[in-house]
Image (cartoon, rainbow, N blue to C red):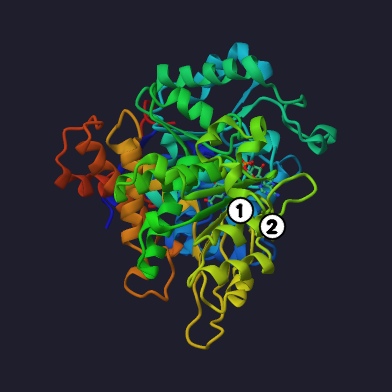
């Protein structure tokens, strides 16, 4: 039982004020005593409901909404009304409802943000208003103990690209996942959209677009705007964690590198995706009984996530298999929109991919397309990859020919189509399962149904390899220890802990990662590993021994349970 059940909060709001505050509203669950004290007796029907009853009613209402996007809108509206009920309901139906509030459905909600708009949530910092940025920032944060900022400039939302101000929908979703899976108190986190304009012509043409209708600001002016925001966080919330989400490929890694020595910052698409993919791969090589450094890894889509995955796997080969970094780099074959990343592409290749550029000599005699590029199928034929990871946003790119070719070169092809939402997955796991005769070991970015075993026997559960399975724990482990930074070793510790929880460890025919039904327990374990590592490395700012970490992690988690309220004019509001 949570310690929070017996919590008493002193609250300054009364009447309509408390009923319209999603943080404090309990709807029909206000007690008779609270109704008297807070002026609610005449504002509520007579019956006092339990949270359980409220959840049943809300679930019945949700079930009348027939499409995922209508369910998403219903849940958003519930979140605007009552946080405990919203989180309580989703916690009771985690596996069913995470795809509604997160990928894949949230992608549609974001793409239609200006048309679905009812009420704003989070903080909107707009380029054209930057002269008053500090004032606007303090309006929402002054006196609040904000421990987590989740921000996006919305240039690369999931796989659906530039979504302008609609990108607030990814930061609110990622914040909600922090609460659901790592118990972050929703009053202590803030979702922020950094509206620097958009290059999405559809949005710019739309007269209902609610963001700043201007082309994306870039270069020095962009950097100064972002810096202004980061310096506000450093000044007013020095111990908070700053989570970057879905920035464009030219900014994501660059901003992480600029700020990681100044503040505890985390880029989910780079570090979270890298960590969850490392865990899935460790689990897969447990099945194939091989080492990380034995793999030939093809990464299709060398953008933010592709590079994040490559670096994380490379660093793990160095740290866990004692490979020299230059040798580890050679285990990777990167493909982007211009084909294989190789020497003769010259300046077409982004600077941060340099370490993985393949020498031209290695590709002499290999057929190229009209533009002289080496395409995916030819790379597969030549390299015989043991692992193929997709982060390209190209739905269906792992064709039947590609997958069958891969299966010729390796006994158990490891195939991770990570692009979101579901329609952008590089291959539907059901097809890859058939084309490999059930041999493929798979994990996907969005949820997919289990695959039938072509030989009969039990279905193959496709693990959901989404950073949401690990980032809440990575972030919470850093936050609770007030770590000065989220180090690479803390991330590897989290990934190893996640891999140790894989069902495939005890049964090689099972999923490569734990199921999302268990995602809260999984993230708790990840947070413990991260916090222990922070203490070990001297990065933590708490006087705990490692043996005390678990207790602190669990007792620090917010639970969707109603506290008892007392009225206090100087209390919370
Ligand atoms: N499963 C997970 O946890 C995560 C999944 N993702 C997904 O990965 C995908 C990519 O995301 P980001 O890296 O943030 O985007 P990004 O835009 O930085 O990267 C996409 C890369 O794919 C390349 N690309 C485009 N067309 C291609 C083609 N035909 N062949 C090869 N490469 C091609 C682009 O040039 C770019 O470098 C998205 O669908 C996103 O939802 C991203 C983060 C986490
Ligand atoms: C999962 C995630 O972070 C993405 O698709 O961008
Ligand atoms: Mg993302």
Looking at the picture, how far across and down is residue 218, in whole percent?
67, 21
Q: Residue at x 37, y 22 (%)?
A: 238
Neighbours of disc 2 within 10 Å: few (<14), some (14-19), many (20+): many
Residue 539 against residue 109 in the figure, above or below: above
Rounded to the nearest whole Å, what is the CA distance between mark 2 and mark 1?
8 Å
Name the one closer to the observer, 432 or 363: 363
Looking at the picture, how far across and down is residue 94, in whole percent?
48, 61
Indicate which disc residue 450 carries.
none
Q: Are marks 2 and 1 in contact (CB under 8 Å)?
A: yes
State the residue lying farthest toward the top.
131
- Tag 1's secondary structure? loop
Question: Left or right of 352: which side holds 282?
Answer: left
Q: Residue at x 52, y 18 (%)?
A: 227
Name the one closer to the observer, 339 or 218: 339
- Tag 2's secondary structure? loop
Residue 254 against residue 67 in the figure, above or below: above
Question: Left or right of 338: which side holds 314?
Answer: left
Residue 508 against residue 340 in the figure, above or below: below
Residue position for label 2 = 395
Asked whether the viewer can see residue 564, the reply is: no
Asked whether the viewer can see residue 561, the reply is: yes
Looking at the picture, how far across and down is residue 145, in whole percent?
38, 28
Q: Residue at x 31, y 51 (%)?
A: 321
Query: Residue 418 sits in which quadrant?
Result: bottom right
Looking at the picture, how far across and down is residue 383, in whole percent?
55, 58
Please report whichever mark, 2 or 1, sits nearer to the chain's N-terminal start.
Answer: 2
Residue position for label 1 = 419
Name the one closer to the observer, 550 or 405: 405
Q: Quadrant of the C terminus?
A: top left
């Amino acid at each position: 039982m949570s310690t929070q059940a017996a919590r008493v909060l002193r609250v300054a709001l009364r009447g309509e004020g408390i009923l319209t505050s999603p943080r404090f509203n309990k709807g029909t669950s206000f007690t008779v005593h609270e109704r008297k004290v807070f002026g609610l007796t005449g504002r509520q029907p007579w019956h006092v409901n339990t949270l359980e009853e409220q959840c049943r009613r809300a679930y019945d209402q949700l079930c009348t909404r027939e499409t995922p996007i209508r369910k998403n809108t219903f849940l958003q509206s519930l979140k605007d009304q009552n946080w405990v009920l919203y989180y309580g309901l989703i916690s009771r139906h985690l596996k069913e409802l995470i795809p509604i509030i997160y990928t894949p459905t949230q992608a549609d909600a974001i793409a239609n943000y200006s048309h679905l708009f009812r009420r704003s949530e989070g903080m909107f910092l707009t380029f054209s208003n930057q002269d008053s940025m500090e004032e606007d920032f303090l309006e929402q944060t002054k006196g609040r103990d904000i421990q987590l900022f989740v921000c996006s400039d919305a240039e690369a939302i999931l796989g659906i690209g530039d979504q302008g101000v609609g990108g607030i929908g990814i930061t609110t979703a990622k914040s909600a996942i922090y609460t659901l899976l790592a118990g972050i108190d929703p009053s202590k986190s803030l979702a922020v959209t950094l509206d620097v304009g958009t290059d999405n012509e559809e949005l710019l043409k739309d007269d209902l677009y609610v963001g700043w209708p201007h082309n994306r600001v870039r270069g020095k002016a962009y950097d100064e705007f972002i810096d202004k925001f980061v310096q506000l966080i450093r000044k007013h919330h020095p111990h908070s964690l700053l989570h970057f989400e879905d920035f464009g490929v030219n900014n994501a890694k660059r901003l992480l590198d600029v700020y990681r020595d100044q503040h505890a910052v985390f880029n989910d698409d780079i570090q979270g995706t890298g960590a969850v993919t490392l865990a899935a791969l460790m689990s897969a090589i447990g099945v194939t009984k091989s080492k990380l450094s034995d793999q030939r890894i093809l990464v299709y889509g060398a953008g933010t996530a592709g590079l994040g995955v490559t670096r994380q796997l490379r660093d793990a080969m160095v740290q866990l298999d004692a490979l020299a970094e230059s040798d580890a780099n050679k285990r990777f074959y990167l493909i982007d929109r211009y084909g294989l990343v190789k020497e003769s592409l010259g300046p077409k290749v982004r600077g941060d991919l340099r370490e993985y550029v393949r020498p031209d000599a290695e590709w002499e005699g290999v057929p190229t397309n009209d533009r002289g590029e080496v395409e995916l199928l030819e790379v597969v034929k030549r390299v015989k990859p043991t692992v193929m990871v997709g982060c390209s946003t190209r739905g269906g790119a792992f064709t039947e020919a590609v997958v069958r070719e891969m299966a010729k070169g390796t006994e158990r092809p490891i195939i991770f189509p990570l692009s979101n939402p579901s329609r952008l997955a590089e291959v539907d796991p059901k097809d890859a399962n058939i084309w490999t005769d059930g041999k493929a070991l798979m994990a996907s970015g969005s949820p997919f149904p289990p695959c039938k075993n072509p030989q009969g026997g039990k279905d193959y559960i496709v693990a959901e390899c989404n950073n949401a399975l690990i980032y809440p724990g990575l972030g919470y482990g850093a936050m609770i220890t007030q770590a000065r930074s989220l180090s690479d070793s803390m991330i590897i510790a989290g990934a190893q802990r996640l891999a140790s929880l894989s069902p495939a460890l005890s049964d090689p025919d099972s999923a490569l990662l734990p199921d999302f039904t268990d995602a809260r327990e999984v993230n708790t374990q990840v947070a413990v590993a991260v916090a222990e590592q922070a203490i070990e490395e001297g990065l933590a700012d708490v006087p705990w021994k490692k043996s005390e970490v678990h207790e602190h992690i669990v007792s620090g988690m917010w639970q969707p349970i109603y506290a008892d309220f007392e009225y206090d004019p100087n209390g919370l509001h």
